[in-house]
Amino acid sequence: MPRATELSLRLALDRMARLGATASDIARQLSLPLSTVRGLIRRSLQAEPERTAGALQPRYHGCGPRPLAAPPLLESTLELRRQHPRWGAGRIRVELKRMTFQAELPSVRTIQRWLRRHDLAPAPPGRPQGRSWQRAEHPHDTWEVDAADQKRLADGRMICWLRVVDECSGAALSSHVFPPGLLHPGALRNGASRAAPLLQAVG
């Protein structure tokens, strides 16, 4: 509809409203949606009489989708990914909580959508490779101490065991089995100091 014709229609609507016609009557006579009529009547009544024509001018500049405001923490999220390309959405969410102390944080899925929308590729899968591990080259350079607690035997008894293995040769230097409670802190006979004699054979 041309702008002049649309303005004339709106001015006619204003005259009808000032003469006492209801919004329903105006909508029916002018073949307009009731919500549109009510909105135009509200605009005309809020304007001064000499400015009614200006208030009823079509507002084409206000049509169409409006740009959405940036969500809270969006920039912080993107900056964290740029600084740490290997961080996934879960790690970024943890860091956001440490940085902002906010109770309301975006979910992991939301952070993933933000990163994808801003062309920040997903973090590489898996954990980053650590430093290369080198096995001990000489016997007794490194001992590995392993323990198991509250293991049930076939007869129902509970045991614990402590084992010391040489890393270079793989030889078991000591393997000691004892009942639960022997190393527990508390009474003197069950104090943690009892752990030392267990290692005397290899210490």
Image: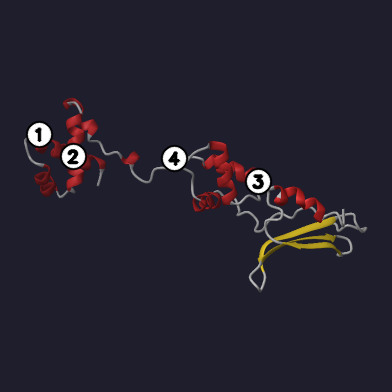
Q: Amino acid at mark 1?
A: Arg
State the image coordinates of residue 69 (x, y, percent, origin top left).
44, 40
Q: Decide if residue 133 is in sight here.
A: no
Residue 95 x %, y %: 59, 43
What's the amino acid at mark 3? His
Q: CA distance from mark 1 to mark 4?
A: 39 Å
Depth order, front residue of 150/21: 150
Front position in the image: 142 or 45: 142
Q: Nearer the viewer, mark 1 or mark 4?
A: 4
Residue 157's image quarter?
Answer: bottom right
Expressed as whole percent of the image width and height from the top left, the position of residue 55 reads 23, 32
Residue nearer the viewer, 151 or 51: 151
Mark-to-mark CA distance, 2 and 1:
12 Å
Mark 3 or 2 closer to N-term? Answer: 2
Residue at the right extreme, as displayed: 138
Label 1 vs 3, first from the N-terminus = 1
Report, in whole angstroms, how far the alpha carbon at label 4 lies from the one at label 2: 33 Å
Dot 4: within a 10 Å radius of its alpha carbon, few (fewer than 14), some, or many (20 or more) residues?
A: few
Q: Which residue is mark 1?
A: 18
Q: Of the numbered discs in the image, which one, if any, rests on residue 10?
A: 2
Residue highlighted by disc 4: 69
Of discs 4 and 3, which sits in the foreground? 3
Q: Mark on residue 49?
A: none
Q: Earlier in the sequence, mark 4 or mark 2?
A: 2
- The residue carrying mark 3 is 84
